Amino acid sequence: MSTGASRDDQAAGECELVLALLAGPAAGGARRAARSLLHWGRPQIQDLIAHLPAPARVDAEETASRLWERGVRALLCDDRRYPDSLRRFSGAPPALFCLGPMELLERPAVGVCGSRDASDEGIRAARACGEEAAHLGVAVVSGYAKGVDTAGHLAALEAGGTTIAVLAEGIDHFRAKTPYRELGPAAGVNMLVVSQFPPAQRWTAGAAMTRKQVIVGLSRALVVVEARDTGGTLKAGEIALRGSRPVFVLNSTSSASPGNQRLISAGGRHVADRRELRALLQTLRVEQTPLLAID
């Protein structure tokens, strides 16, 4: 009986993966696929998929089987487990490919964005955020890049907390980096990896920008560390402010942080020290109502 149940689970899971793989191509793009799923439901998407060329459907089925065996699961935007904070956020993807404990998506979360080439001060600030979030039971959401992202992810895990890595590439390209492997089983149990992109898609600068929508959408607030005058960190802060997400700009003496003042001037909050950061993160544990509907 358990074998039959597991086979049923696998069949259902692979069907979800096929939908996630083909929804965008069938609907004419990710945004249209999300609208279709949310407003008209799966029958319309399934009908559109049925009209795709047979080789595309066969390839998707083979890919779904391979992904399932690797432990990858699909989460479509009409699924009740898909975070409402992301579903109602502008630019929400029709599906997420997930590797790891999907229940982490149910936790209150804070986004952490910052420079790949952060100063020592910036790395310490990112680590402080990860540690404080872990102690409060708040998940850290970041982009799995070097610098601030890695500091936030690792600090959360080392402090016994949880973290969500949002990739700028397809999930086929995910490999656990050495510092994460050195943490042992904790990384696998307490870290979720998600990607909104086709599994085989490689990293691009455009994708790195696009995934900022997911980092912000999954988070109740965004912590900014050493934002430059252009680039992804500044962009993430601007996305968060437009989406009525609080933006906490950590104090920095670095001359490489001109974007910090721009975000503060636009409505971000300057955070002077760790005590103030802890108090702000504590407020994220209170249930909040999403403010934006998907457009």
Image: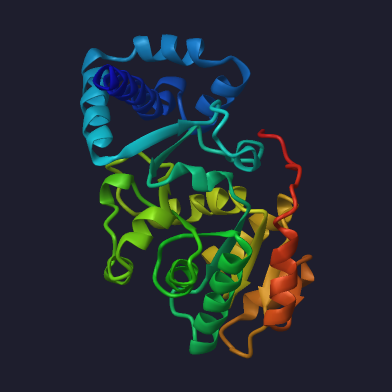
The structure residue drawn at horizontal position 30% and vertical position 65%, both measured from the top left corner, is: 184
Which x, y percent locates residue 185? 32, 60
Against 34, residue 243 (above or below) is: below
Total numbered circles: 0
Q: Quadrant of the C terminus?
A: top right
Structure colour scheme:
rainbow
Which x, y percent locates residue 239? 65, 54
Q: Nearer the viewer, residue 265 or 18?
A: 18
The structure residue drawn at horizontal position 43% and vertical position 56%, both measured from the top left corner, is: 190
Q: Is residue 270 left or right of residue 189?
A: right
Q: Say if residue 254 shows up in the picture.
A: yes
Q: Is residue 231 left or right of residue 177?
A: right
Q: Is residue 168 left or right of residue 40?
A: left
Q: Is residue 179 left or right of residue 84?
A: left
Which x, y percent locates residue 37? 54, 21
Which x, y percent locates residue 118? 48, 81
The structure residue drawn at horizontal position 33% and vertical position 46%, both measured from the top left corner, is: 170
Q: Quadrant of the N terminus?
A: top left
Against 250, residue 242 (above or below) is: above
Q: Say if residue 262 shows up in the picture.
A: no
Against 126, residue 28 (above or below) is: above
